[in-house]
Amino acid sequence: MCYKNTGNGERIIMSEHVKVLFSEEEVDRVIEEQARKISKDYEGRQVHLVCVLKGGVFFMCELAKRITVPVTMDFMALSSYGDGTTSSGYITMKKELDESIQGRDVLIVEDIVDSGRTLKYLVEELSRRNPASLRLCTLLDKPDRRVVDIKADYTCFEIPDVFVVGYGLDYAQKYRNLPYIGIVEMEETKVE
Ligand code: IMP
Ligand code: MG
């Protein structure tokens, strides 16, 4: 919560409010659908999930629980966002994978594809390491915001250009733990 002075003696209280976009049940149902597709596509193989921290972690756990072929996992952290809602456009690796991906069937698991820069960077980086295959899976996709040409192989939800939180996604590091996906709204209340 914060205050804003209007200049005419009034003060406005600004408070954040999260509006539900996709309920927990809906998200779980769609993840189940994608997990079924993945299990079918990787039949007879082992899938190596590469989670992009921190946002992808909730999604990866829920997805992995529902995949029926053998699964291994690794984690990587990148940064492209500051603490706000606008992209810096500059990507750095903050945590490397623990294991080699050479010869493995790798599936990148992301929370959201926005400008697409993060995924593009990751695909270029991981392709150089000679995986047997490399595919992309994302919980959310904002196609209207794309600035580079990239498309995930598995997408749970396509959304318009709105800032979303929950299910791993944050606003200034908050709300990752919400079990649903929501939109942050600012509410204004006048006080005398
Ligand atoms: P990119 O612009 O596709 O490179 O996305 C970079 C990262 O920005 C994503 O992995 C998210 O962590 C973050 N991001 C993009 N849009 C949102 C949003 O609506 N809510 C929370 N994080 C977001
Ligand atoms: Mg992310």
Image (cartoon, rainbow, N blue to C red):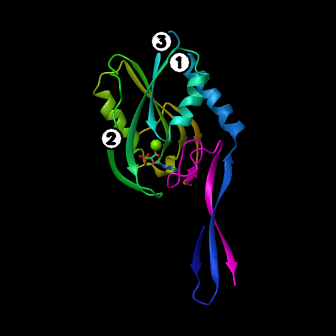
The amino acid marked with disc number 3 is Arg
The amino acid marked with disc number 2 is Met
Is residue 171 in view from this perspective? yes
Image quadrant for the C terminus?
bottom right
Residue that protrudes farthest toward the left in the picture = 128
Sequence-first disc among 1 and 2: 1
Q: Which mark is residue 41?
A: 1
Image quadrant for the N terminus?
bottom right
The percent position of residue 131, horizontal first and vertical second, equals 34, 21
Element at label 1: helix
The percent position of residue 38, horizontal first and vertical second, equals 55, 22
Residue 83 location, quadrant: bottom left
- Local crowd size for mark 3, using a 10 Å CA cut-off: few (<14), some (14–19), many (≥20): few
Sequence-first disc among 2 and 3: 3
Q: Which mark is residue 93?
A: 2
Q: Residue at x 38, y 46 (%)?
A: 79
The amino acid marked with disc number 1 is Asp
How far is mark 3 from mark 1, CA to CA?
9 Å
Mark 3 = which residue?
Answer: 45
How far is mark 2 from mark 3, CA to CA?
29 Å
Residue 100 location, quadrant: top left
Element at label 3: loop
- Local crowd size for mark 1, using a 10 Å CA cut-off: few (<14), some (14–19), many (≥20): few
Element at label 2: strand
Span shown in magenta? 163-192
Magenta-colored stretch includes residue 180: yes
